[in-house]
Amino acid sequence: MEKKYNIGVIGGDGIGPEIIKEGVKVLKSVSEVLNFKLEFIEYDFGGERYLKTGETLPDSAIEEFKKLDAIYLGAVGHPDVPPGILEKGILLKIRFELDQYINLRPVKLYPGVWTPLKDKKPEDIDYVVVRENTEGLYCGIGGNFKKGTSDEIATQLSINTRKGIERCIKYAFKLAKERNKKKSLTVVDKANVLTFEGDLWRRTAIEISKEFPDIKLDFAFVDATCMWMVKNPEWFDVIVTNNMFGDIITDLGAITQGGLGIAAGGNINPEGVSMFEPIHGSAPKYAGKNVACPLATILAGGMMLETLGEKKGFEIIERAIIKAISEGYIKSLEAGKMGITTTEAGDLIAKFVQEIK
């Protein structure tokens, strides 16, 4: 019996609808090659809908999402909507309501891709950041006192639970074992200053490490980690860290792998519905010009297939992207500098998928 997956598609804002269209095109090509079926259900959540209706994401949509196999997201962010409204109302709501407690960010340099790191090659930049995705400062617990006065106070609490940390670290250990590369896990924190939070993360990691005796456990402060990601990226295999630090260091990782045009991520619930997206924003200045690089979105689609159990699908997509870049079909990962249009890039990868099968 042919396997079938129901995928929710949110094009979103700016370049989102353009790049997600190319991602869907490539996914359809892969499904034809590997003989499984993808049913795409489109949703119009984003800035335009919010401006028309005042609605970000109704609870009824969350209930629909729970029945899907995965969600495929383009981008969220509209220049006419104040910062935070769409991010909290759509992205964070999906992550929290669907308990997508892992943010997975591969940092991998592909052949033919430029990196600003001198003398570093693809074999030097190949690690994964596991970011805790539903706790920390992103819980939004805090407030203002005497707002608008010279005595104003603002508080924002970082919430870290044993349960949240434990499941995140356990996922990271399992990933290090599955990757079977350096077999190392680095816990990134700021335990010398954030002593209570850091202590809980470290104690939990040490306890869980007993279940994984073949994985080497290391600890690193986040500021030092930023230096090593530039100087010695080859040291890393799997990094696990809290929500805020993960948000920051994954952007640093993205530029070392060639920029936002190739950086994909997943919001994972290993027991439920996960969401996949490029990590760049909506880039409204490029919207409608057919110049945005869709490779990060296409790779996110590959990650989605891998998470659904279609690992071969991810491998084919990755090989198609490597072929397009290393053989000069796509000259740059920057918007407007690819040498071809967004649509042509999607066509190219879809074509290579058929040839690579």
Image (spheres, grey):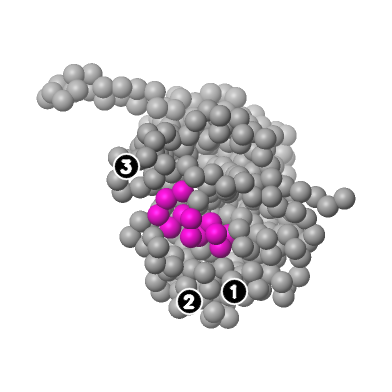
Q: Position of residue 329 (x, y in %)?
A: 54, 79
- Main SS of the magenta part reads helix
Quadrant of the rendering where the C terminus is positioned: bottom right
Read off the residue under disc 1: 348
Which numbered circle lies on residue 340? 2
Q: Residue at x 72, y 40 (%)?
A: 213
Tell me the SS state at disc 1.
helix
Marks 1/2 in contact by CB < 8 Å: the verdict is yes
* Real-space Cα separation, disc 1 to disc 3, in angstroms: 35 Å
Q: Position of residue 33 (x, y in %)?
A: 76, 65
Query: Which residues, given as a range, are shown in magenta?
Result: 12-23
Q: Position of residue 291 (x, y in %)?
A: 42, 69
Q: Is residue 320 left or right of residue 36?
A: left
Q: Indicate the amino acid at tag 3.
A: Val
Q: Is residue 71 left or right of residue 198?
A: right
Read off the residue under disc 3: 81
Q: Residue at x 80, y 59 (%)?
A: 35
Q: Position of residue 198 (x, y in %)?
A: 47, 30
Q: Indicate the amino acid at tag 1.
A: Leu
Label located before the other in sequence (2 or 3): 3
